[in-house]
Image (cartoon, helix red, strand yellow):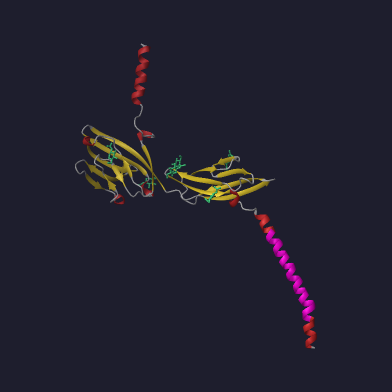
Amino acid sequence: MQGALWPSLLLLLLVLQPSGSGRAEAGTMELSRILGDSVTFLLEIPAEQVRTVAWTVNATRSIVTVTAGTPPNVIVLDSSYEGRLRVPENNSLQITSLRMKDTGTYGAQITTASGISNRHFLLRMYKQVPEPTIVCDSVTCVKETCNYNLHCTVRDGGDNVTYSWTHTAGGAVVPNGSILHISLSPRDAHLNATCTAQNPVSNSSTTASAKGLCAAPASSLSYCHLKGIVLLLVLGALSAGIIAVHVLPGREQRRD
Ligand SMILES: *[C@@H]1O[C@H](CO)[C@@H](O)[C@H](O)[C@H]1NC(C)=O
Ligand SMILES: *[C@@H]1O[C@H](CO)[C@@H](O)[C@H](O)[C@H]1NC(C)=O
Ligand SMILES: *[C@@H]1O[C@H](CO)[C@@H](O)[C@H](O)[C@H]1NC(C)=O
Ligand SMILES: *[C@@H]1O[C@H](CO)[C@@H](O)[C@H](O)[C@H]1NC(C)=O
Ligand SMILES: *[C@@H]1O[C@H](CO)[C@@H](O)[C@H](O)[C@H]1NC(C)=O
Ligand SMILES: *[C@@H]1O[C@H](CO)[C@@H](O)[C@H](O)[C@H]1NC(C)=O
């Protein structure tokens, strides 16, 4: 008895496994697109079985109804999709010139000869990742070797951006998200580090050398300038003194 029950239970579980590439609840298919791109929601039902498809977004807004035929009869119900919808011959729905506001869950209610079924698609819109900027957070040198902390950021458009680093030097590299800790000998200090910013639809990179970014530590630079300025001031004071002591009294004597 038991010997026969287990295989049939297993078979039942296998049959109940959701099929297809859809994920999340009720087989919702997730799609990511970039601003201005287009998306096609595939129904995966033989076109000749489909009678009508009613499309909604976010469960409540009706956007279009499609009645099968050659060509299919397309009635756009939402003006924000006017001119942006296409219905390929297999009754799938294509949206072109995508906008950020098009993000949402799209539902298709499909009527066939044998009944009604539903499909769901979750569309996420992203912008192209802007080129990242690398800045020098800090540099500390012990003997000849310097430890650099570089920081990579993108301005706005930063939704779900992840960062990665590559570096050509053999030095110890500890990438931690947007921060790169790197220890370099003078021999390797000129080598480049590349930061790549990535979102689900695009990526963008910037390359720079740690030495260039963290240029000669600021304090020693201004110390050099300071020395020059002090020297000039001293020279200026000296010449003013010389003029006052030697030239001016002479003039006054001549006037007498
Ligand atoms: C439906 O049509 C689109 C566009 O012509 C095509 O890319 C897609 O493969 C078709 N899908 C099926 C299931 O026939
Ligand atoms: C669907 O809802 C989301 C969040 O509630 C909203 O951001 C999006 O713009 C809506 N999509 C449409 C097409 O109305
Ligand atoms: C960002 O990613 C998280 C986790 O992966 C996800 O829950 C969230 O919806 C994403 N945000 C956008 C705007 O796509
Ligand atoms: C990475 O950075 C975060 C915050 O900047 C810090 O809390 C974490 O400890 C760091 N991880 C490593 C492995 O350095
Ligand atoms: C570092 O990058 C700059 C600019 O991207 C490039 O001109 C230079 O050749 C690179 N240097 C090395 C050592 O790769
Ligand atoms: C960055 O995008 C290009 C296509 O634009 C792709 O070939 C490459 O694999 C992407 N790189 C990463 C690290 O995702």
Q: Where is residue 124 in the image (x, y as percent from the top left)?
A: 39, 43
Magenta stretch: dominant SS? helix
For the point 68% across and 46% down, the residue is 144
* Residue at the extreme front of the image, as rendered: 187
Q: Where is residue 226 in the image (x, y as percent from the top left)?
A: 70, 61
Whether 3 is drawn above or below 72: the answer is above
Q: In which quarter of the image is residue 49?
A: top left
Q: From the image, which quarter does the C terminus lie in?
A: bottom right
Q: From the image, which quarter does the N terminus lie in?
A: top left
Given residues 66 and 176, the one toward you in this image is 176
- The mark total stands at 0
Given residues 133 and 43, the one toward you in this image is 133
Q: Where is residue 236 in the image (x, y as percent from the top left)?
A: 73, 70
Q: Does the magenta stretch include residue 238?
A: yes
Whether 248 is drawn above or below 48: the answer is below
Q: Is residue 156 left or right of residue 33?
A: right
Q: In which quarter of the image is residue 179?
A: top right
Q: Where is residue 251 in the image (x, y as percent from the top left)?
A: 77, 84
Given residues 255 and 160, the one toward you in this image is 255
Q: Quadrant of ligand 1?
A: top left
Q: Does the magenta stretch include residue 250?
A: no
Q: What stretch is highlighted in magenta?
A: 224-248
